Image (cartoon, rainbow, N blue to C red):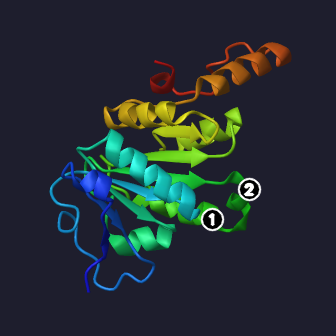
Amino acid sequence: MSTPALVDYGLASRGRRLVEVSETVADAPGPGEETGLKPAIAIIEPRQLVRECLRNCLAEAIPDHDVVTFASIDEWERGKVGHRDGDLVVLYYDPREAGRGNAQREAALRSRIGPNTSLVLLCDSEDPGEIVERLNEGARGYIPTNVSLKVAIEAMRLVRAGGVFVPASCLLQRRAWSEETGAADPRSQFTPRQTA
């Protein structure tokens, strides 16, 4: 049984398609089968409305990637999409859930994506310490949900091009905190590559 494809007719007229992976993936396609030869953007987001809106916007803004959505990390693993070089995995990350066993799942996800696959975290938090921790674990971008859609799309483009995205508001918070506590260098928590 193949994965059902959802077609948004507004995008279909321009030759693009959207792929939705159902929760019961039986014989999921291998890399390169369902999504064609283009790299994929795999969105792992439990909230259906957010997942669908993000999928539609990214399909329009980044037409050279297939956009595939999943409701969970387990579903993503069964779907076998977003594991190839050049793919981008966008994962909704909730720090409050990290204490409930999701941290192990997310660490497993980071270990399963390919070395040239980028991980971007979509998060409701802007805690500078949390951001630094996730970047040190291998995330290439940290997008808070309070940024505009335009900023989120540009952040994903930056990560696709090999960069690292950290929200400016986080850096400003970190700087203010460092000045209040008398820390010597606000960049001391970042690696040399992240501060470059």
Residue at 84% of width from left, 18% of height from top?
Answer: 181
Q: Quadrant of the C terminus?
A: top left
Asked where in the image residue 118 lies, by quadrant, the reply is top left
Asked where in the image residue 157 lies, by quadrant, the reply is top left
**Residue designated by label 1:** 102
For disc 1, the neighbor class at 10 Å (few under 14, some 14 to 19, many from 20) is: some
Q: Amino acid at mark 1?
A: Asn
As drawn, 86 above or below 146: below
Rendering coords of residue 175 (x, y %): 71, 17
Return the mark for residue 72.
none
Residue at 35% of width from left, 72% of height from top?
Answer: 79
Residue contact at pointers 1 and 2, CB within 8 angstroms: no
Q: Quadrant of the N terminus?
A: bottom left
Residue at 72% of width from left, 23% of height from top?
Answer: 173
Q: Nearer the viewer, residue 91 or 181?
A: 91
**Residue designated by label 2:** 96
Looking at this view, name the residue that lies furthest to the left.
Answer: 37
Asked where in the image residue 24 lies, by quadrant, the reply is bottom left
Q: Amino acid at mark 2?
A: Arg
Whether residue 40 can be seen here: no
Rendering coords of residue 161 (x, y %): 31, 32
Q: Nearer the viewer, residue 55 or 196?
A: 55
